[in-house]
Amino acid sequence: MTRVLVLNGPNLGRLGTRSPEIYGSETLEDLREQLSGSVPDGSSVDVRQTDDEGTLIGWLHEAVDEGMPVILNPAAFTHYSYALRDAVAIVTEAGLPLIEVHLSNPHSREEFRHTSVITGVATGVIAGLGFDSYRLALSAVLRRVTPGS
Ligand code: DQA
C-alpha cells in the first residue's frame, strides 16, 4: 500500500471562502474527497493542513521515517521558509518524490510570490491549475513509486 502525504500550509484551511477569484470556491474537504476518489487500488492519500511551520516540518520528517511520497502546497512559507526548505531537502535526499504544488500561478501575481525557496530541492513543481495541480502531482508521484501505474 502506497500512502501519499498531501500537505497544505497556512490559510489553505480557508479554501472555499478565501479569495475565491484566485483559489476557487471548493474547500479542502472537496480536495480530500476528489483525491481519495481518484487514487488507484493499492494507494491512498492522507490530506492534511496546518497553519504551523513546525507541524509541517514534523510531517515531512514523518514522510522520511515512513517512506511516504509527498505533495506539498507550502502556501506563503514557499516564499521565505528556509526551515521548510531544509525539511523538503531531507525528503528528496532520502530518494522520496516531493512535488511542490500551487493552486494559483505565483509568477502571475505579486513580486514576492515569484520566489520559491522550496523549488530548488523539490522533485518538481506544478502551479496555476487549481485542484488539477494536485491531481497531476498525484499521478506523477505514483508513477515514480509504482512504475507502470
Ligand atoms: C499558494 C500561493 C502562495 O503564494 C500563497 O501564499 C498561498 C497559496 C497557491 O496555492 O496558489 O497561500 O501556495
Image: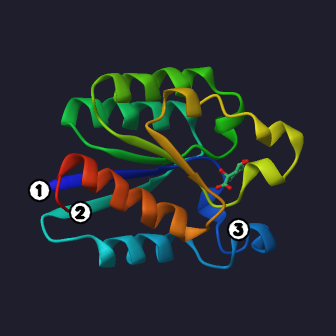
Provide the secondary structure element on which disc 2 rests: strand
When asked about the image quadrant of residue 74, the answer is: top right
- Queried on whether the Cβ of the residue with tag 1 lies below 8 angstroms from ligand 1, the answer reads no
- The quarter in which the C terminus is drawn is bottom left
When asked about the image quadrant of residue 17, the answer is: bottom right
Residue at 35% x, 29% y: name it. 91
In the picture, measured across the screen, residue 32 lies left or right of residue 94, that is right
Rendered location of residue 12, percent (x, y): 62, 58
| Amino acid type shown at disc 3 | Tyr
Is 41 above or below relative to 104?
below
| Amino acid type shown at disc 2 | Ser
Rendered location of residue 14, percent (x, y): 66, 64
Is 21 above or below relative to 100?
below
Measure the C-alpha gap from mark 1 to mark 3.
Answer: 32 Å
First-in-chain label (3 vs 2): 3
- The quarter in which the N terminus is drawn is bottom left
Provide the secondary structure element on which disc 3 rests: helix
| Other-residue count near label 2 (Cα within 10 Å), few / some / many at <14 / 14–19 / ≥20 | some
Q: Residue tagged by mark 3? A: 23
Q: Could you say which is closer to the camera, residue 36 or residue 38?
A: 38
Q: Looking at the rendered structure, which numbered label has been put on residue 44?
A: 2
Q: Looking at the rendered structure, which numbered label has been put on residue 1?
A: 1
Residue at 61% x, 66% y: name it. 129
Measure the C-alpha gap from mark 3 to mark 2.
Answer: 25 Å
- Queried on whether the Cβ of the residue with tag 3 lies below 8 angstroms from ligand 1, the answer reads yes
Q: Looking at the rendered structure, which numbered label has been put on residue 25?
A: none
First-in-chain label (2 vs 1): 1
Rendered location of residue 51, percent (x, y): 60, 45
Tell me if label 2 and label 1 are in contact, CB under 8 Å.
Answer: yes
